Every structure is written in C-alpha cells, then in structure tokens.
Image (tube, helix red, strand yellow):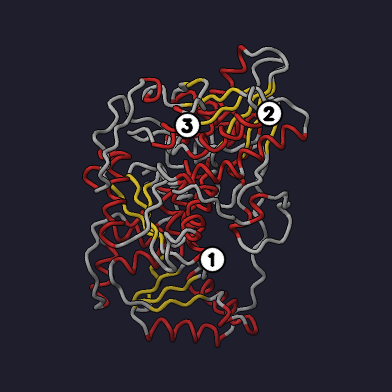
Amino acid sequence: MTSTRTILPHTLLSDTKRYSIHDSVIDTVGNTPIVKLHRMSRKKGVDIYVKLESENPGGSVKDRLAVGVIEWAEQNGQLKPGQTVVEATSGNTGIGLAMVCARKGYPFVCVMAESFSIERRKLMRFLGARVVLTNPAHKGTGMVIKAKELADKHGWFFPNQFDNEANAWIHEMTTGPEIVNAFEDANIKLDHFVLAYGSGGTLKGVAKVLRERSPDTKIHVCEPDNAPMIYSGIETKYPESGTPSTSFHAAHPVYRPHLFQGWAADFIPKLVCKADKSGYIDEVIHPGGDDAINTSRELAAQEGIFSGTSGGGVLAGAIKIAETAPEGTSILAIIPDTGERYLSTPLFDNIPADMTEEEKALAESTLSTPPPPPDLPGVLPEAIEFVKKTNTENKVVFWSLQYCEFCWTLKKLLDAVGIPYEAINIDSFEYAKDQMGNMYRAALCDMTDCNTFPQLFINGEFVGGAVDACMMWKGGELQSRLNEAGVEFVEYEGDPFEFLPKWMSQNPLRSK
C-alpha cells in the first residue's frame, strides 16, 4: 500500500446516529458503543469499560477491516468490478467481507481451517460467499498459502489482511478517534487500553491514534498463554518472494492450538511486527482458555453482554490489570465480536439444551393447562370425498402443514429414500378460501382419529406421522408397506431420526 489516503464513506468518520437513515449497510459500520461494567470490576474505584464491536452490522470488529481493504482497493485500482475477492480468515473477517462484497457485487471466497466454528461458515454462505475449508493441521499459514494459490490461479483479488496497511488505516481513521473522542467528551482519562492482536490492524491503527492524542494510555496486547509468540521474541520470517509455496519460511515454533478463534495464527502478522517495532505495545498479557470461557460466561450473566472467547480473553486481561491498579483508574477492553458464532465451540459445552432439574421443577409447579383446540368446521361429506379421492389416486400421500418441522421431517425422509409422493399442505393459501384447508383437516381427524400432522397414507391406508415413519423405517416395516404398494425406493443407510427437529428432547440424535 502506498501512502495515498483515500476517502471512505463519510458516515464512518462522522457522528451519524445509529437511528439515522443510511444509504447502505456499509455506512452503518463503526461508531460502536462503549459501555461501563458495573459488576465485574474486581476493585472499588477502578472502572472497566468495553467497546462493543459486536454492534457492527456483521457482528464484529472485522467489519471495519472489510470496508477499509475493499474501498481502498477500489479507489486505488486494485479491484475490478465483478472481480472475485479471496481471503484467509478464521471467520470474522470473512463474514465482514461477505457482507461488504454482497452489497458491492463482488463474489467472495473465504479460505478457513475446518476447525473454526460451523456457525462462521454458515453465516458466510448465507451472505452468498463460498467457503474453502483447509486441513486444520495446516493452521493459519496453510490458510494464507491456499488463499494466495487461489488468487494466483484464478486472478482473484487477495487483500491479505495480515499485511494490508488499509487494515490499520481504517482503525486509525475510525476506531481510534471514536475511543479518544468518547473519553474526552466524558472527561475521563483513559489509563489502559486492552486488545488482542489478531491481524494487527486494530492494534496498529488505534495505537497510532492513542500515542498522538492520549500518550499516557498504556497499550496492553493479549495473546494465548499457551502460544506466547510475541513474548518469545522470535519473529516470523517472510521471504522476498511472494509465491504461495514460499509465503512463510516456517510456522512459528512457539505456536500451539488454543481456544481464541481469530487471536493468533501460527505466525506473527507483519502489521503486528510493525506495531511492535513502532513502540505501540507496552505490555503483553497471557490469558488462558479457561479464563476466557469463564469471563465470557460471567460477562453475559453479570452484565448482559454476549461475547465469545475472544472478548472473554481480552476482558480477562483487563480484569487482571484492574486488580493492581490504583483507585481512579479507567480501563478499556475491546470486545471484538458476539457469542452467537461460538455455539458449536467449547464455550457452550456446559450450556444445556434441555431443561435442568431446577427448570423442570419450575415447569411442574403449575398445571401447564393446554390451550383450547382450533375451532374447526364440521365434517363435511365433500371434504371426506376429497381426502379419500386424493389417497386413492396416489400411492403415497402425506397431509401436511406448510411450516411444521415434523412435516419437514417426513418430507426429508421420503426425499432421502427416493419415494414419489403427493403432498397436500392444508394450511397453504391455495386452501384458504372458505376454510377449505380446515375442512380437509376436520375430515382427516375424523377418519384417522389423529389431530396432529403430518399424516402419511400408503395405498389409501393411514400409516402415521413423522416419528412413526422414522421408527417404521428403522424397523423395516415402512419398507414392507412400500413393497406391498409397489412403490420403488432406494436404501438409506443413515438414521432417519436425523431429520427430526434438533430441539426435540426425545430426538435420540440431538446431542450428536
């Protein structure tokens, strides 16, 4: 990146309120709130504040990076209209880039190790991105090498967040001033600033502003206690050649797997090295994974703030500073993202999906009076005739409610075994006039003595519902019924219970 300074969306640099009308989602990035903690400061008279980067539209601090690297590339001729963007990321940068690229019309490909949370890859795909998963054993260096391979092979734009000065610059223009302005406006002296180094952009950009405008603020950088790469003093060596196979001389010897997704890859990014050599790091703190998990959970339960292990680790570092700080000290910690993208990680291992014994006791403390049934019309001969005619004309019929998850269960099972069927969604708009759908429902309930849906018929005979069909398939009875009816199907080696709703406490596969 050259020293050229380009103009980014003015809302990033202004005091535009969140409730204002914005031209696009990109204009809502930044201006995130700073919140004082009241129940987690370990020492009276020492105030801990958190900057909630989860309030960015993509849910993390990396939304800023995404806007910065894409708009700088656009305005400096590095990114062509419609060109594919590819980046190596643990997920948050990918989500931010997927959001920005969706708005601007660039295809986006994320390269991410398979070990990162499933939620992240689903979020990116939901935003229209493609996700290429790499071998977890290849770690962060493998992700970067793969991204560069793809960029070189296909002519894609590779921002390289770990070395892109636009990453640091966007924080110099936005995050840093937001922090300094907020504390100045509140007439509070900021004594300590705590963050994880990640790609190095937040560190380098914010630190530059703090050194210029708040020089007494101490900057504390967190890294995993079992992967103390900065602490080791061993630098990552980068070759002059940029070819994929020589992107790194070697992975960092001190790196070990850790619980902090996005904190520290198996190399020290160039932006971090530059920040360190510029004197932007006053102290390196080493939280542990257990500290991060416990602090994340405490932050949610005590302060109502939902964060992942990344935020928990940074806050754990801030709390450590607070324990020995003198009265009147103010500490700010960056909470980089939200906890929702950690649901499949160890952070939620001890969070039950089913009711605890205490919750069951609460539930049993009242009668749990059932609601009244729907007020269905009477059973009409023409409705019975329609149901019988449909069941007779089709070998396999299932009567369904359009957005019922148990109805989806049966549909998925029938699709998986290749069975042709007729599905009647009695609550669809097609049957809304004159309560036609409810008339068919009343007729079905009268014929089967069953009030729930779906209802499966084979050769005109009522078979049962979704759970019945799953159990019959597991026991071989459904296959026999289909053979008797002359219905062809394919063998399915999976477990049909996998199609049942995951929230269903009786689902034997829900914990798998």
Considering every residue shown, the one lying at the far front of the view is 3
Q: What distance separates the C-alpha of mark 1 from that of mark 2?
A: 51 Å
The quadrant where residue 512 appears:
top left
Q: Determine whether, in the image, residue 418 is placed left or right of residue 51.
A: left
Tag shown at residue 37: 2
Q: Mark 1 points at which residue?
A: 451
> Is the Cβ of the residue at disc 1 closer than 8 Å to that at disc 2?
no
What amino acid type should be assigned to the residue bearing mark 2? Leu
Q: Position of residue 499 (x, y in %)?
A: 38, 58
What amino acid type should be assigned to the residue bearing mark 3? Ala
Residue at image position (28%, 67%) is 417
Residue at image position (54%, 79%) is 440
Res. 96 in view: yes
Of residues 216 and 88, the one drawn nearer to the viewer in this rendering: 216
> Is the Cβ of the residue at disc 3 closer than 8 Å to that at disc 2?
no
Q: Where is residue 475 in the image (x, y as percent from the top left)?
A: 27, 57
Q: Where is residue 301 in the image (x, y as percent from the top left)?
A: 62, 31
Comparing labels 3 and 2, the label whose residue is closer to the camera: 3
The quadrant where residue 235 appears:
top left
Res. 465 in view: no
From what the image shows, is residue 50 above or below residue 151? above
Q: What distance separates the C-alpha of mark 3 from that of mark 2?
A: 29 Å
What amino acid type should be assigned to the residue bearing mark 1? Asn
Q: Mark 3 points at which residue?
A: 275
From what the image shows, is residue 216 above or below residue 28? above
Of residues 257 and 206, the one drawn nearer to the viewer in this rendering: 206
Mark 3, secondary structure of its residue:
helix
